[in-house]
Image: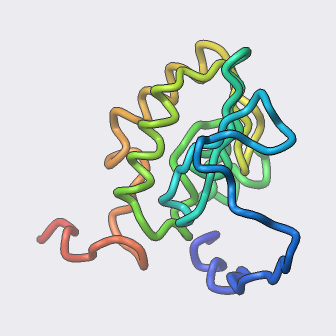
Amino acid sequence: MIAKMSGAFPIEPINLGSHIHPLPEDGTVPYLSDFKWIHVPGHTEGQIALFRDKDRLLIAADAFVTTKQDSLYHVVTQKKELSGPPRYLTPDWTAAKESVRKLASLNPYIAITGHGPSMEGSELKKDLNKLADNFDEAAVPNYGKFVDDSSESQI
């Protein structure tokens, strides 16, 4: 149902004028000296995550989420379940897979995502590593606007 509604979601760019500036190439984050930024494309081309080494805090954006976005029940109840980026609006699944692997390699202790509650400790480690290891089966849809429909199983 969420995927069917996604056509009505706004996707037009927003003019932020002079309010934004390119991030430094060295991964530092202006005004947040403890954080580094990490390019995690897939869900969007320019998506970044923020990571703080001292407590292994990860702000993951939508590289992965902790409430499955293709389930209306999960969205309404905010059921905690680590899954890949929202299926209905992720145009580059190869990049999304690499982004999840990159974030899992950081071994975060706590993750905050764009959708869902925070997740931490052994639950996060287990679920994020499982997603990274099984991304194609667990996250990539079998069909849809952003996948190669020719890969569907033939009858």
Give the residue drawn at x 63%, y 56%.
69
Q: Quadrant of the C terminus?
A: bottom left
Residue 122 versus residue 116 in the image, above or below: above
x, y percent for residue 68? 61, 49
The image quarter containing residue 119 is top right
Relative side of 54 to 140, left or right: right
Residue 102 versus residue 52 in the image, above or below: below
Give the residue drawn at x 46%, y 46%.
99
Return the residue nearer the eye: 15 or 31: 31
Q: Furthest residue to the left?
A: 155
Give the residue drawn at x 86%, y 75%.
18
x, y percent for residue 77? 78, 47
Return the residue nearer the eye: 43 or 48: 48
Give the residue drawn at x 70%, y 43%.
113
The image quarter containing residue 51 is top right
The image quarter containing residue 57 is top right
